[in-house]
Image (cartoon, helix red, strand yellow):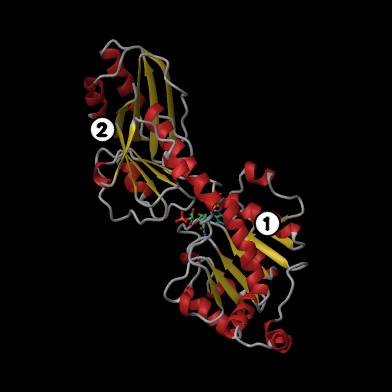
Amino acid sequence: MVKVNCLNPIANCGLDLLTENYEKTDNFQEADAVLVRSAAMHDLELAENLAAVARAGAGVNNIPLDKCAEKGIVVFNTPGANANGVKELVIAGLMMASRDIIGGINWVNENKSDEAIGKTMEKAKSKFAGREIQGKKLGVIGLGAIGVLVANAGNRLGMDVYGCDPFLSVEHALNMSRDITLVKTREEIFRECDYITVHVPLLDDTREMINKDTMAMMKDGTVILNFARDLLVNDDDMKEALESGKIGAYVTDFPNPKTANMKGVIATPHLGASTAESEDNCAIMAVREIMDYMENGNIKNSVNYPACDAGVCNTAGRITVCHKNVPNMLTQFTAIFSKEGINIENMINKSRGEYAYCIFDIGAASTDHLVEQLQDIEGVLKVRIIK
Ligand SMILES: NC(=O)c1ccc[n+]([C@@H]2O[C@H](COP(=O)([O-])OP(=O)(O)OC[C@H]3O[C@@H](n4cnc5c(N)ncnc54)[C@H](O)[C@@H]3O)[C@@H](O)[C@H]2O)c1
Ligand SMILES: O=C(O)[C@H](O)COP(=O)(O)O
């Protein structure tokens, strides 16, 4: 029985995929697999039995990826599964920053008991006038699942779209409209664009990419949209830029105590992926990833281990090994099978950075004795019997 713990509520259509071989537990420490959204995992103690963590979503900065890798815990995410939900909210953000929709709605609420509201509004409305986005320049930093959808949508709305992503994948490039101008550096976007939207993961080299120096390059009144992570922006610098008019508005899905109280900020409470469709897509993808890993040892969409797919095992046994990506590991593994007189019928070994992963399909049923010997090799992080 595989024990699954949900650190956040996960959509039922995903959980319903779990067969009778899985059991939900409320106890994180006894889980073999964990499903999570944004719950912070950095301070949690990781039990020996934990084999997999699936993030039903994109950003994994709430998960200690290296600590997990070091313990042979494979971490997955669900690329693209919530991208359309975020794209639609970004478009709403573009609109809210361009037309004073919020001011106008507030005015109607404040004047809702005015019998003559139909007349008074005609006088009041000039306070809420805005500008159109058609013909304006939109810069998209990060052309992944969300960035490409935002870029294409901006293009369809008549914007002149610029995109920047030094690691642009072939898949995302193929999905991008040819009308979008690809630029090599984000500085070109900072200098050129009226609206700048960031869709990058929070990493050391993206942290505070919007700061005093980068905002100084921008046109006066530039609108910044941040539906990625709050730490991509230096809040104190943003406050100054909003006060001076350098930045016209800061739209963020990640308010914090500073930005929630900042004039010129339009904030939503991390709503990007909070649609029924995105929650269902993420839950289904995350549960399928966990099940394929637990039942077959296959890895798809991991963020700390290499992809590895051996299909369904059709030999007598299958053993998987998470290990350090260092010399002489395979020789030591195969020596153990050879000593036990067990034939390796198929084998896959993949590496990713400091870590590597092996699937051995063998001619005999796997035994605890085999596992113990493999586990004793220095550099082996986790050994699992699949069959
Ligand atoms: N508001 C929300 O609810 C919500 C929902 C989903 C994702 N997110 C956030 O949005 C981020 C992006 O999500 P995604 O699904 O598009 O991820 P993704 O992995 O598909 O795309 C990220 C892109 O950023 C690019 N990138 C990395 N470093 C870069 C850099 N220095 N400069 C430019 N590009 C760089 C990558 O090459 C990749 O193409 C996530 O990491 C997450 O933080 C927020
Ligand atoms: O990175 C993500 O996928 C988003 O920030 C969504 O987070 P959530 O699943 O907590 O809504």
Q: Residue furthest front?
A: 115
Residue type at mark 2: give it: Glu
Percent x, y of residue 308: 46, 30
Residue 357 seen by the camera: yes
The N terminus, quarter of image: top left
Q: Which residue is mark 2?
A: 378
Q: What residue do we see at 73% from left, 69% from top?
A: 133
Say few, some or many: other residues with alpha carbon within 10 Å of mark 1 (under 14 / 14 to 19 / 20 or more).
many
The residue nearer to you, when weighing 277 against 378, is 277
For marks 2 and 1, the one nearer the N-term is 1
Q: Residues within 10 Å of mark 2 (few under 14, many from 20)?
A: few
* Percent x, y of residue 309: 47, 28
Work out whether residue 119 or residue 381 is closer to the camera in this orientation and state it.
119
**Quarter that holds the C terminus:** top left
Name the residue at 47% across, 24% down: 311
| Identity of the residue drawn at 44% across and 76% down | 258
Q: Looking at numbered disc 1 in the image, what kind of residue is underneath it?
A: Ala
Question: Circle 1 is placed at which residue position?
Answer: 151
Vertical placement of residue 27 versus 111, above or below = above
Q: Nearer the viewer, mark 2 or mark 1?
A: 1
Q: Are marks 2 and 1 in contact (CB under 8 Å)?
A: no
Question: How far separated are the C-alphas under marks 2 and 1?
Answer: 48 Å
**Is residue 352 visible to the viewer in this orientation of the structure?**
no
Give the side of residue 183 with respect to residue 316, left or right: right
